[in-house]
Amino acid sequence: MKISASIYARPNTPLPAIIRELDEHGIDLYHIDCNDELSVFDDIQKIRKISSKPIDLHIISKQPEVYFSLLEKTPVEYVTFQYENLTKPLEVPTNIHAKLGLAITSDTDISVFERYKNRFDFILMMATTPGQSGGRFNKSNFKKIRAFAKHFPEKKIHVDGGVNAEISFILRNMGVSAVVSGSYLFKADYLGAAMLGLKGDNFDSEYRVRDFMLSNGEAPILQENDLDFLKILNAIETYNAGFVMIQNNDHQLVGIITNADIRRALIRNIGNLNDIPINEMMNTSPFSIQENYSVNEMLKHIKAQRFPINYAPVVDAENRVKGAVTFFNLIKGE
């Protein structure tokens, strides 16, 4: 996951000094908020003389077309347009070759991206109030990120606002491509330590597993008394999850069936596929995670296992199924 530093989050430091310090610590992108200020292009030119790192420009304007000629003369690698400020549908000229993004606030539905999906490359989720530095991450965006990834699987997701070390870890696990960081980076005693925090797994934990897990409607669950081989296969295929959780009538977790379990059952019963016993496939003592675990508690629980964890059911104190967590994106990204 790339880190995009919000360069205006430290207003009392000369821009060249900020850029050099960020460059020394391996920043990935320079994030520039443009609130209808043409002067930002002067800053872009200054940055180009110091660093070759990509520019991540966020245009917040009712007249974004004013910037098209400037973007042609002074190209940037990423340019995002704030959806809520648009007064009419946005048509970006083809001679602008930057990767294009649409920024939306927490209250805007992801469906607005539909109009732009053929031209735009990514969405920028504004997880706090736009323009407010140091705001708190709105956890409703966890669900929006999952929904966007499902509806637009080929598009990238960027997040801006309230990103600290813990949020960064969760977002990496969700497959987010880039995060914008300002206050967290520049208010730290040492910028290098803050950079490591955004890319590591050592942090103070505030959020709970229930805040970012796949909910029951987003994860495959079948009833114990209504199982057959075809339903199991369909559930795994529909959710593209690699597993299905099995619960009883009281919603308590009784087992899990994975792709590997099915494969082993097929090998054992290759001569009689119609009579594969369901119980033979099910792991009736599956690894699970408590919904009220903090992120640190979840990681500690995972690291204590002798086998790698790719996904896990999430349960409450009575072992009722509440959802699931998966780690495919984190494994791929790390």
Image (tube, rainbow, N blue to C red):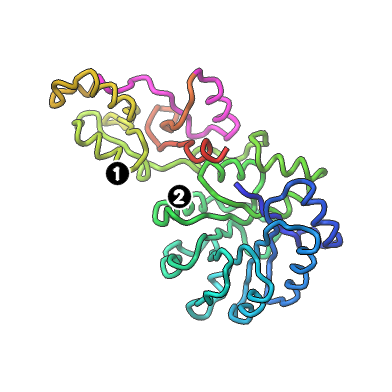
| Residue plotted at (61% across, 78% down) | 68
| Residue plotted at (33% across, 38% down) | 220
Identify the image quadrant of residue 9: bottom right
Identify the image quadrant of residue 110: bottom left
Tag 2's secondary structure?
A: helix
Magenta stretch: give its range: 280-306
Which numbered disc, 2 or 1, marks the residue that appears first in the sequence?
A: 2
Left or right of 169 on screen, residue 88: left
Left or right of 24 on screen, residue 288: left
Residue 154 x/y as whole percent: 44, 55
In this figure, which residue is indicated by the disc labeled 2?
146
Tag 1's secondary structure?
A: helix
Q: Identify whether 165 is placed above or below 48.
A: above
Q: CA distance from mark 2 to mark 1?
A: 15 Å
Check if residue 136 falls in the magenta segment. no
The answer to whether residue 74 is visible is yes
Residue 193 x/y as whole percent: 76, 40
Q: Nearer the viewer, mark 2 or mark 1?
A: 1
Question: Which numbered marker is on residue 302?
Answer: none
In this figure, which residue is indicated by the disc labeled 1?
238
Check if residue 293 falls in the magenta segment. yes
